[in-house]
Image (tube, rainbow, N blue to C red):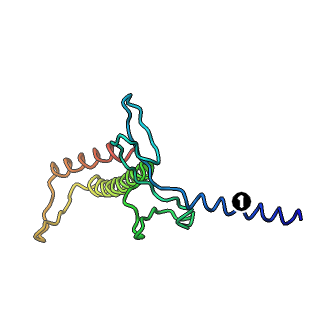
Amino acid sequence: MRTNIFFLTVITLILMLSATDVLAKDEVYRWVDENGVVHFENQAPEQGGAEKIAIRPNQNTENQSSMDVSPQDANGDVDSEVSYAQQRRDERARKREEADEEKKLTAAGCEHSRKVVAQLEPMTRVLVEQEDGSVIRMDDNDRLARLREEKAYIARNCNQ
């Protein structure tokens, strides 16, 4: 007899809990009263002037996996609305990538300048190939000016 009452009670509780989810409305109205107080209710006020607020359905009722990382709308498209925190993470990642790219370019420039200095410093006679394919000799003034430019670049960018 006791077990029958127990099972009847459990079944009744299960039915009541499942019925509350079915009866729950996803409509919320926002309105401001004459004192400037903002109210949120599931029924529109009688005097009108309420704004209906769209509420996203609960993920549990949609049977979505909790492992789903990208928010999706009803059509399965990725939600275009990205959270502020995600925007900040994306921005920091983009800045890190730009900084890494800048470091790579600077390192390549330093390597090039060091090679040029290594070629120009000991030599007094430097031959330079022109764009048209002809070869000319660089005079000492041009060589020393180019050497100063490359050393200045190295001092500015490479000795950090």
Quarter of the view holding residue 105: bottom left
Query: Quick one: 26 or 135, which is closer to the camera?
Result: 26
Left or right: 3 as drawn, with respect to 89:
right
Left or right: 86 as drawn, with respect to 131:
right
* Percent position of residue 107, x then y: 37, 55
Left or right: 114 as drawn, with respect to 126:
right
* Percent position of residue 72, x then y: 44, 65
Answer above or below: position of 45 versus 79: above
The residue depicted at 21 percent of the width and 50 percent of the height is 146
Q: Amino acid at mark 1?
A: Leu
Query: Quick one: 12 or 61, which is closer to the camera?
Result: 12
* Percent position of residue 87, x then y: 40, 51
> Which residue extends farthest right?
1
The residue depicted at 83 percent of the width and 62 percent of the height is 5
Q: Quadrant of the N terminus?
A: bottom right
Identify the residue position indicated by label 1 in the image: 13
Query: Quick one: 118 or 99, which is closer to the camera?
Result: 99
